[in-house]
Amino acid sequence: MTYDIIIIGGGITGVSIAYELAKKKAGKILLLEKEFLSAGSSGSCAAGIRAQFGSEFNIGLMKLALEKFEVLAEELEYPADRIGLWQGGYLVMSSSQPEWESLKARVIVQHRLNVMTEVLTPGEVKYRFPDVNVDGCFGATYHSKDGHADPFYTVFAYGKAAERFGVEIRKRTEVTELVRDDQGIKGVRLADGDTIEAKQVLVATGAWTHHLMKTIGLDIPLWGERHEILITEPVERVFSPMVISFSLGYYIQQRPHGSFIMGLPPEQKHRWFDPAQFDISPTWGFLERMSDTVQRILPRFKGLNIVRQWAGLYEITPDSHHIIGPIEEVPGLFSAAGGSGHGFMYGPGLAPIMAEWMLGQSLSYDITRLNYQRFAKGELVIEPAVVG
């Protein structure tokens, strides 16, 4: 059977692009997922959403994504309490004078793009958020529209909406190879040996993207890295924002039901290109470091019981940005992976633009700088406001 478009990967990126393509009547669309929707990085993430980035490009893109999240439940016809958008803000802490100056400089750019971030002194942080320990803090920024959503239900909502528009979704269906000829992409080969043909193929497989592209001789600079998260028992809800430090690497947030979710980047960086190397087992070292960090930042909550700890894969690129768009060496082949810890928050904003790109339409926001060719040209897209 031949399709107009095959999408590989059932995370936020794959399902949201499938939905946007189907809305545009892009033809016969098949989405293939080797496990279940949100089984990869989307289902392992902390689900934060923020517009407090450093580059004008990312601020503008995440402003679009935030606006999309705000209407997502209505658009996808899915219960808003399940998608769970909570805009409690992000409180970005600085731990040195140079970092504080950088944060204030970013706010100038954010204001220019109508992202109305506030600048807070340590005293103002303590007044607004008395549970936060401001020792060693030089100042913070706060944007009230930042927040989080439920990654599982958001992906499920996109999947259901895509199916209503005619997308065929096959779960428990693993793609082992891409298939090409001298003219370009031809389709995909499944684990059972079957081949499915398509005019276009979109690879949205996160950390597995490098391995899959290798099957047709492409060396995509994208690897997996284990990041860990834990969640506590629920307590009375008293704390709204995500408190985060780019320099120290932590992020901590109380969810609407009262549990605290938090994470830190790994002490040891791994560049895993081969899925056989992928390791998402939790570690004792993370538990110790995270416990020490949260007790220092939010000392009131010392003694909370930990309910669960898990790990997932950041799919990382050399400049911590997606590799998105056409692969020029193989006409008809597209990539949408490499979110580097920000894939969930970018997803709803990137999806309609990626659909435009795949259909040869004018782009409503220029994301062409995230193309695969930028690495060979040395045109990396640097973003300073990242954890990790």
Image (cartoon, grey):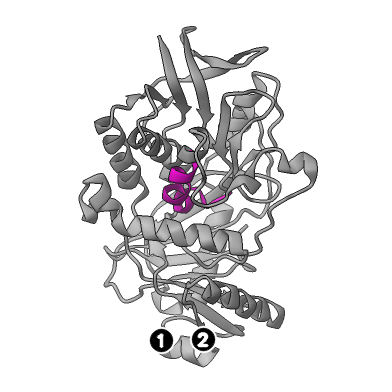
Q: For this rendering, which residue is in front, 240 or 291?
A: 240
The answer to whether the residues at label 2 and label 1 have Cβ atoms under 8 Å apart is yes
- Where is mark 2, residue-wise? 120
Q: For this rendering, which residue is in front, 204 or 231?
A: 204
Magenta span has 286? no
Residues under labels 2 and 1: Cα distance?
9 Å
Which of pointers 2 and 1 indicates the residue nearer the eye? Answer: 2
What x and y, as percent, mark residue 192?
A: 46, 9
Q: Is residue 193 above or below residue 283?
A: above
- Local crowd at mark 2 within 10 Å, few (<14), some, or many (≥20)? some
Q: Is residue 116 above or below residue 352?
A: below
Comes first in the chain, label 2 or label 1: 2
- Where is mark 1, residue-wise? 128
Taking 146 as reference, is 165 left or right? left
* Chain part drawn in magenta: 340-354
What x and y, as percent, mark residue 46?
A: 44, 54
Q: Amino acid at mark 1?
A: Arg
Residue 98: name its quadrant. Answer: bottom right
- Local crowd at mark 1 within 10 Å, few (<14), some, or many (≥20)? few
Q: Which residue lies most toward the front here?
A: 362
Q: Is residue 337 above or below residue 193?
A: below
Q: For this rendering, which residue is in front, 215 or 162?
A: 162
Q: Amino acid at mark 2?
A: Leu
Q: Is residue 141 above or below residue 70?
A: below
